[in-house]
Image (cartoon, grey):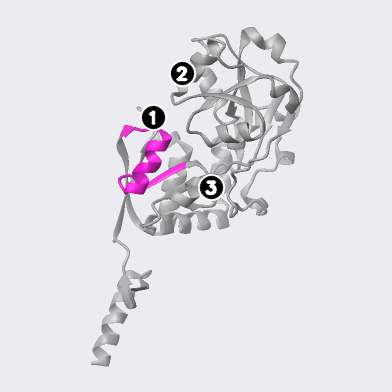
Amino acid sequence: MLKIVFTLLLLVFSISGVAEVKTINGKKEVTIPPSTLNIIYPKTMPSLIEDNYYPLLLLKTALKRSGYKYTLTPATEVLGQNRVLKEIEKGTIDVTWTMTDKEREERLLPIRVPLFKGLFGWRVMFINEQNLAHLSQLKTLDDLKHIYFLQGQDWPDTKILRDNGLVVSTSLDLEFLFVMLERGRGDLFPRSILEIKDEYAVFKNQMPLAVLPQLMLKYKSPIYFFFNKNDPEIAKAVNKGLKIMRETGEFDELFYQYNGEIIKNAHLHDKIVIELRNYDLPRLTPVNDKSLWLSFDKVP
């Protein structure tokens, strides 16, 4: 009898390769990951060119390197950030990439590898070009406390700005934030250095848009892959793939391939850098692992 049991267990582990033994209510159960991971990701734009979209390409590459079989399918409709997070909790969407905060890490399962090496906390600011003469006099954090900022209502950045004493008006709709800027309902609209070029190209013909030349904000705000806490198998695969990519240098190669020119052309060393504190940064953020972040002194 013992020989039969041993043989069956050996067969289970040889088939799965990564089978897990869990103790549930005092009983040991062997769990085997699915032969194929069927993954639904959020549709972030009505027309998404997947080959050119860095977070999705990074996800695909990590899954390939993991050795797992998988399928990747977009959700059927474009959803806002908060809705995507709720759908992940429900299990109808499997993965997203978004900025972390304490609440999100309590609700969901993060892989603590900053996908953009922290650059979503490096913020330059859109302005209404008609206000350039006035706003070009801003130099310090105290100066900014008398200015009205614009941000998304459900963005972690909004709380970061407010926690640093700044006044922020919000909207759930990205396009309407530009309308608010045009109508004078806000003075500065901070955007990541990785976002500002594409958004300027989209909105410059709709309003007198400019970028504040002399200032930038900088705060710790990693973007991670997030998953459902109760179904960690996809997260295990992605984590395995990201680890392999980092060890081989492929992660950095892909990062600079898609973001290197933007960083180079941002002329960051010409700007006054105002450092803000992120009071909502989770305790387990790997702030001391320098390999995960882009250092400002390494920017060309």
Residue 255: name its quadrant.
top right
Q: Secondary structure at mark 3?
A: helix
Displayed quadrant of residue 265: top right
Vertical arrangement, residue 247 with respect to residue 180, above or below? below
Q: Earlier in the sequence, mark 1 or mark 2?
A: 1
Residue found farthest to the top? 130
Q: Which residue is mark 3?
A: 102
Label 2 CA crowd tier, 10 Å (few <14, some 14–19, many 20+): few
Q: Sort mark 3 into few (<14), some (14-19) or many (20+) by Cα contacts within 10 Å.
A: some
Relative image position of residue 98 (x, y in whole percent): 48, 41
Which residue is nearer to you in this view: 203 or 134?
Answer: 134
Looking at the rendering, the stretch of residues picked out in magenta corresponds to 77-97
Residue 176: assigned label:
2
The three-letter amino acid code for the residue at tag 2 is: Phe
- Give the x, y percent position of residue 143: 74, 22
Tag on residue 45? 1
Nearer-N-terminus badge (3/1): 1
Mark 2 or mark 3, which is nearer to you? Answer: 3
Q: Is residue 238 visible?
A: yes
Check disc 1: other Cα within 10 Å, few if <14, some if 14-19, many if 20+: few
Numbered mark located on residue 161 in the image: none
Residue 89 forms part of the magenta stretch? yes
